[in-house]
């Protein structure tokens, strides 16, 4: 082996199992949930809302023994009666929604507030088009440019607006439009 290859082989990890190769993973061993973990999950749902599994996991008030957010979701689905689980999703527009709705154990659960959507004005559309001419597809630069007066918009909002209102210009910038979903 030449000296250069010897040096490289000491610096670069072995390629027996390169990162993109298919390596069979051993499935994780199933562990039963403790009563304490289940209680923590329910209290986390009350505090952070159903579906905010990552926030519940990160909250130091609750203890989970090596669980993932998917584990929390799966456990919640198994302990929550099917009718009630469906009810949680029929209460999408209510603020707050309720665990154990319709029983004397009903618990109000806060729902995370979405930011309010604001309709684009004609002036903002014109500023967006000027911004694309000036900055290209650097959406954050367009949003931050004081001459364009779009600082109250996020870059992703500007991109989506251009895609939806001006699909030909969006395509001309090199982006692909996704096909319409048939209903």
Image: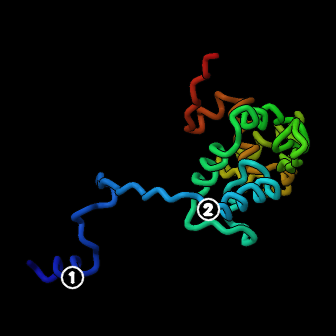
Q: Which residue is mark 1?
A: 7
Q: Which residue is mark 2?
A: 34
Residue in view at x 69 percent, y 34 percent:
82
Determine whether label 2 and label 1 are within 8 Å by CB: no
Q: Residues within 10 Å of mark 2 (few under 14, many from 20)?
A: few
Colouring method of the image = rainbow
Q: Quick check: can you spot residue 123?
A: no
Q: Is residue 143 positioned above or below 5 on the image?
A: above
Residue in view at x 17 percent, y 76 percent:
5
Q: Earlier in the sequence, mark 2 or mark 1?
A: 1
Q: Nearer the viewer, residue 173 or 55?
A: 55
| Nearer the camera: disc 2 or disc 1 | 2
Q: Residues within 10 Å of mark 1 (few under 14, many from 20)?
A: few
Taking the image as shown, residue 166 lies to the left or right of residue 26, namely right
Q: Quick check: can you spot residue 178?
A: yes
Q: Nearer the viewer, residue 56 or 131?
A: 56
Q: How far across and down, in percent of the image, does residue 122 sit? A: 88, 33
Q: Is residue 35 positioned above or below 158 on the image?
A: below
Taking the image as shown, residue 36 lies to the left or right of residue 102, namely left
Structural distance between the alpha carbons of marks 2 and 1: 51 Å
Quadrant position of the C terminus in the picture: top right
């Amino acid at each position: 082996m030449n000296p250069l290859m010897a040096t490289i082989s000491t610096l670069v990890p072995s390629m027996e199992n390169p990162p993109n190769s298919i390596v069979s993973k051993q499935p994780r061993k199933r562990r039963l949930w403790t009563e304490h973990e289940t209680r923590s999950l329910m209290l986390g749902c009350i505090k952070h809302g159903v579906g905010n599994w990552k926030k519940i996991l990160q909250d130091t008030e609750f203890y989970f023994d090596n669980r993932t957010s998917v584990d929390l979701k799966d456990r919640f689905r198994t302990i929550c009666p099917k009718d009630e689980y469906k009810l949680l999703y029929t209460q999408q527009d209510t603020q707050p929604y309720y665990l154990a709705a319709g029983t004397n154990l009903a618990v109000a659960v806060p729902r995370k507030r979405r930011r309010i959507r604001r309709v684009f004005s004609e002036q903002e559309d014109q500023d967006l088009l000027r911004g694309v001419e000036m900055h290209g597809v650097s959406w954050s630069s367009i949003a931050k440019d004081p001459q364009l007066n779009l600082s109250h918009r996020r870059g992703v909002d500007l991109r989506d607006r251009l895609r939806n209102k001006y699909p030909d210009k969006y395509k001309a910038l090199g982006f692909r439009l996704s096909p319409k979903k048939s209903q």
